[in-house]
Amino acid sequence: MTCTGDDLSIERGALSLFNRPDFGRLFFAISISELGDAFHYIALMWLALDKGGALGVVAVRLADSVPALVFGLHGGIAADRWDRKRVMISADLARAIILIPVAIAGLANRLPIWGLVAAAFLLETATSYFAPAYNALVPELVDRQNVQEANSLIGATTNALSIGGWAAAAGLLAIVPISTFFALNSISFFVSAALISRITRRDGTGVSMNLEPPRIREAFVAMRPIPTLAAGVIVLGIAITISSGTWIAGVPEMVRDVFHRGAGGYSIVMIGYALGSVTVGAILARFPVEDKARASLLAWILYLPAYGMFALGHTFSLAVAGAFVAGIAEGAARILLTSAAQEQIPDELLGRVMGVISLVHRGAHATGLLLISPLFAVFAPRGIFAGAALAIPAVGTIGAALAYFGEKRRRMSSPSESL
C-alpha cells in the first residue's frame, strides 16, 4: 500500500482524530451501541435473577462468555478473509434482529430463562465476529501511530456512557417496563450498522488477496517474533480469569455480607470501576506510551492495591476505591495490548491476531466463572481477594520478566537487529 505524507503523520491530541470523518462514524457507531448495551445489561441480569435466581444469573453469564471460546478464532479468520466493514455490519444487524423477539416476549411477560440464555449466547456469537473486524479496522482509519489515542478515546467515552446508561435506566424504569431496554439495544445496533455502512474505504484492506484461506496458526506465527506481545496475550488470559472470577462472585457477596449494602451499593461499586476505566482512557488518550506491550504487563501490578482494598479494607468507601483502581488496571492493560498489536502486526494478519486477543479476553470471563467463582462457596471472600491481589500482579511481573529475556534472546540470535 502506498502511504502519503498525511498517512504517516502522528496527530497530536485524540480529538484531532475527528478530522477524519470515517473515524467519527466509527466512534459514534460504537458509542451508540455501547449505550444500548448498558440498558441491555440491566435488563438481562435483573430478569435472569428474577426468573432463574442465582443459577439463572450464572447460566446467562456463561452463555455470554462461552461463544468467545467457540467462535473467537473464526471471527479473526473472517476479519482477514472478508471485508471487515461488511463483517461488522452483518454482526450488528444480527444482534439487532436477535433482540426483536426477546423484547416482544419480555413486554408480553412471556420471556423464559432459556430465552435469555439463548439470546445471550447468540449475541456474544455475533460479537465474536464484530470485535476482531472492528479492532483490525481501527488502524486503517487512524493510521498505526494514532491507535492508542483512538482506542483510549473510544474506551473512555463508552465507559462514561455506561455510567450514564445505568443512571438513566433507574429513571426510565419508573415509566417503562424493563424489557423496553432490549428494544432500545436493538435500535442501537441498527443505528450502528447504518453509521458503519457510511465508512468509505481507502483500499481493499481486510479482504484476503491470497487464494489460500487464512489460517489461525499464522496469527501465532506472527506473534512469535514479538515476545512481549505474546506474553501480554497469555497474561491477559490468566489475569482476566482470576480478576473476573473474583469480581463476578466476590463483589456482590462482599457488598451484601461484609458491607451490608443492597443492590444500590453494588451499583456504586460498578460505577467506581467504570470511572477508573474512564480515567485511564482519558490519560492514555493524552499521553502516548512507547513500549505498549510491556506497559500492559506492568499495569496488572495495580491489582495489588485494588483487590488489597477489598481484602483488608473495613469501609465501603475503600471497596469503591479498590474498584476504581481495578478499572484503571484492566483498562490500561487492554488498551495498551490492543494498541501494541495494531501497531506491530501486518494488516493481512491483524484480524486473526485480534481474534486471538478477543478470544482470550472474552473467553477468560467464562474460565473465571468456572474456575475461580466456585471458590467463594468454600473460602471467605476476603481471603480470595487477598490471594487475587497477590496472584494477578505476580502473573504480570513474571510475564514482563519472561518477555524481557525473550527479547534479549531474540536480539542475541539476530545480530543485525542489535546494530
Image (spheres, rainbow, N blue to C red):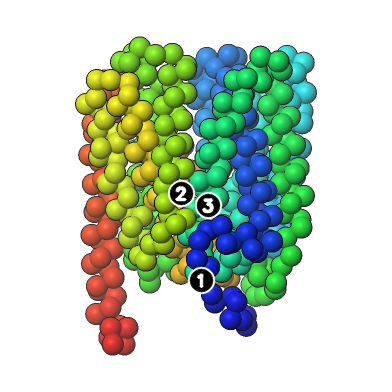
Q: Tell me which amino acid carries mark 3.
A: Leu
Disc 2 crowd rating (10 Å Cα; few below 14, some 14-19, many 20+) is many
Q: Which quadrant would residue 114 be assigned to in this image?
A: top right
Residue sitting at x 44%, y 57%: 286
Q: Specify whether 346 is left or right of 179.
A: left
**Callout 1 environment at 10 Å: few (<14), some (14 to 19), or many (20+)?**
some
Cβ atoms under marks 2 and 3 closer than 8 Å: yes
Residue 85 spot, x, y in % from top left: 70, 59
Q: Which mark is residue 92?
A: none
- Work out whether 58 lies above or below 2: above
Residue bearing the label numbered 2: 281
- Above or below: residue 319 compared with residue 195: above
Residue 153, labelled with which disc? 3
Pointer 1 residue: 10
Residue at (58% x, 81% y) in the render: 5
Of the numbered discs 1 and 2, the one sitting upstream in the chain is: 1
* Residue 39 placement (x, y as % from top left): 62, 29
- Gap in Å between the C-alphas at discs 3 and 1? 16 Å
Where disc 1 sits, the SS reads loop
